[in-house]
Image: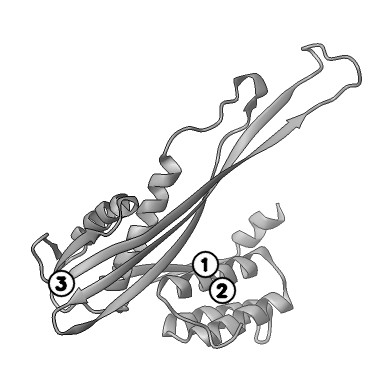
Amino acid sequence: MVLSLIIGCVHQVTWVEERSAAYPLATTRVAVVAMERACRPLADALVKELGSRPGVDVHPDATQRIFVKQCDDLLTTSVDVEGNYPGIDYGAEVYFERRRYTLHGWGRGVMEVQAPGVDPVTFAVDIERDMRGPWVASDAFDMPANPELQTRLTGDLAERLADKLAPLPETIRRVVFPDPEPGTARRLHNDAVAAERSGNLDEALTLAKAAYGADPSPIAMDYIERLEEHAEAIGYAFKSK
C-alpha cells in the first residue's frame, strides 16, 4: 500500500539521447570474422546485430574487418527448495515440497577492429544474466536443459559490441516528483534527473546519492542503479563514486 501511494505521487519524463560511437567506423562496410570455433555464435549474432543498424553494410569482402575472439562463458544452476516438515507424519495430505531453479550466466567477447591505414582497436565486453524458473512440486521438477540463457547472453554480447561501433539512440525514462519543496529528497532527486538529462552524469550521481541519504526510498535506490547502468551502457566512467 505504501509503495502504491509513492508511485501514485510521481510523474515520468522521457527523452531520446543520441549516443556517440566509441570507435567511429572508417567506412560503413564491414566484415565479421570468428577467430575461434567458440566465437562463431557470437560472430553470427554480431553480423545480424550490425546489419540491423542504420548505415552499416556487413559484407564478407569488406576491407574493414571485425575479428571476434577470446569468447568465454559460464553457466551455473542453483535450486531453491521449500517444504513443510510436520514431524514424523509424511502423509500426502500434510507434506508438500516444491522447487525452482535459477540459472546464472556470464559471458565475455572480444572484438578487434582493423581498417587499412588505421591502428587496430580492441574492445572487450562482459555480460551477466539470470533466469529463474517457476515453483513446481518436487515430483514434477526437472533441471533446465534448454539453451535459452546461452542464446540471450550471446545476443546481449553482440548488442553491446555493436553499440561500440554503431550505437542506436536510447530512450531514457525517469520518474520525477511534482513541485517538491526546496532542499528535500524529492527536489534532490528531480535535480539529479535534470543533471542526467543535460549530460552531467557525475553531478547526477552525486545528487541521486544525496537524495537517497535524505530519504532511502525504493525510488531513490532504483534511480541510482538505473543511472549507473546508463553510464555503463554508454561507456561513461564516473570521476568518483
Against 104, is 98 above or below? above
Pick the residue in front: 94 or 181.
Answer: 94
Please, what secondary structure does the residue beneath circle 1 have?
strand
Q: Between disc 2 and disc 1, whose residue precedes?
A: 1
Q: Which mark is residue 64?
A: 3
Location of residue 191 by image quarter: bottom right
Residue 158 on image: x %, y %: 33, 59
Location of residue 176 by image quarter: bottom right
Residue 201 placement, left or right of 109? right
How does the figure colour the protein chain or chains?
Answer: one colour
Q: CA distance from mark 1 to mark 3?
A: 46 Å
Pointers 2 and 1 in contact (CB under 8 A)? Answer: yes
Q: Nearer the viewer, mark 2 or mark 3?
A: 3
Pointers 2 and 3 in contact (CB under 8 A)? Answer: no
Against 83, is 151 above or below? below
Estimate how packed mark 1 is, as few (under 14), some (14 to 19) or many (20 or more) residues with alpha carbons within 10 Å: few
Q: Nearer the viewer, mark 1 or mark 3?
A: 3
Residue 127 placement, left or right of 121? right
Residue 206 on image: x %, y %: 60, 84
Q: Which mark is residue 178?
A: 2
Estimate how packed mark 3 is, as few (under 14), some (14 to 19) or many (20 or more) residues with alpha carbons within 10 Å: many
Q: Can the viewer see residue 34?
A: yes
Residue 177 on image: x %, y %: 58, 72
Circle 3: residue type: Gln
**Residue pictured at 85% horizontal, 25% vertical:** 85
Quadrant that contains the C terminus = bottom right
Residue 161 on image: x %, y %: 33, 65
**Residue pictured at 64% horizontal, 68% vertical:** 221
Q: Between disc 2 and disc 3, whose residue precedes?
A: 3
Q: Which mark is residue 190?
A: none
The residue singled out by tag 1 in the image is 11
